[in-house]
Image (spheres, helix red, strand yellow):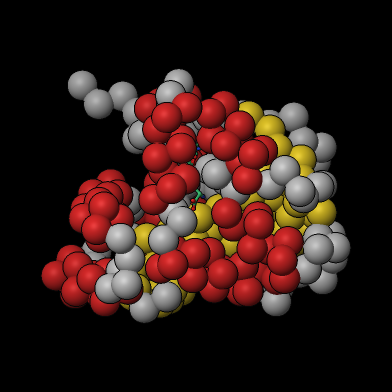
Amino acid sequence: MKTSRGEDSFVNLPAFAAKLYDSMMQSDATQMQYKEIAQDLVSRIGNGRLLDIGTGPGHLLHEIHKLNPNIELYGLDISNSMVEQASRNLADIKVDLLCGNIRATNYKSDYFDLITCSGSFYLWDNPIESLEEIHRILKFGGAAYLYETHRDIDKQKLWQKMKENLKGDNLIRKFLAPRFFIKQIGMTYAKQEIIEIIAKTKFANSSKIEEITIFNLPVWLRVKLEKCA
Ligand SMILES: C[S@@+](CC[C@H](N)C(=O)[O-])C[C@H]1O[C@@H](n2cnc3c(N)ncnc32)[C@H](O)[C@@H]1O
């Protein structure tokens, strides 16, 4: 019987798997994806505290830092080996990295100006409690932006676009990356399911979901959740 959406498999992720994931995410195409998300986020925050949930190897935080080194960066991940990989990748940057589950954190209430995550929400076993926790730790007037792929998309079209994106890349990544991404998309929510989850949280009346294209891939949702005063 399936008991977890996927977060369980990350709790004891071996170090080699975190390294493999890290190296898969080094392709030019994926780095462009982080750059585009970072640009979008940095345009929405002056300075202040930013938390990346499910930060993995920390590539998004790195891109955000390059664009605005004054933003105070925080990264949370349920996997200790991912946190260790992020510490290595971000060794030259001041960043507060923590191993933990977004369902219940030790961050202070009303603490973050902006909270984000990319490709992590779909794995959370308790999405409603986790969104309530995000609401608690966000400042009033602050917002969370979740960048998530959704499964109600045209997989053939996605395959084609991914091939174009990976044209200049090495053979291993050309082989592995599209298969990994398509498998991941199969596990994600349909847009309507996300709407129904949000409707059960304190963000029910302050959310906006947009279908967006990130680095040529028209498979993304940007979920904006505002904490209103
Ligand atoms: C597919 S990876 C994405 C990593 C990173 N955001 C990126 O874009 O490269 C998903 C990450 O979410 C983390 N994760 C899953 N469930 C979590 C939870 N409940 N709380 C915090 N992190 C979680 C996993 O350990 C993993 O590192």
Identify the residue at horizontal 60%, vertical 48% (top origin): 58
> Which quarter of the picture shows residue 217?
bottom left
Q: Position of residue 185 (x, y in %)?
A: 28, 54
Residue 74 as seen in the image, left or right of residue 164 = right
How many numbered callouts?
0
Q: Where 19 sits versus 156, above or below?
A: above
Quarter the C terminus occupies: bottom right
Residue 57 as seen in the image, left or right of residue 197 = right
Q: In this rendered view, identify the residue nearer to me: 45 or 20.
A: 20
> Which quarter of the picture shows residue 193?
bottom left
Quarter the N terminus occupies: top left
Q: Position of residue 47 (x, y in %)?
A: 84, 65
| Residue that sits furthest to the left in the current view | 156
> Which quarter of the picture shows residue 175?
bottom left
Q: Position of residue 191 (x, y in %)?
A: 35, 62
Identify the residue at horizontal 53%, vertical 28% (top origin): 81
Identify the residue at horizontal 59%, vertical 57% (top origin): 60
Residue 174 as seen in the image, left or right of residue 23 = left
Residue 208 visible here: no
Q: In this rendered view, identify the residue nearer to me: 204 or 142.
A: 142
Residue 193 visible here: yes
Q: Where 84 sits versus 138, above or below?
A: above
Residue 216 as seen in the image, left or right of residue 164 = right
Q: Where 200 sits versus 10, above or below?
A: below
Q: Position of residue 157 (x, y in %)?
A: 19, 74
Identify the residue at horizontal 82%, vertical 37% (top origin): 108
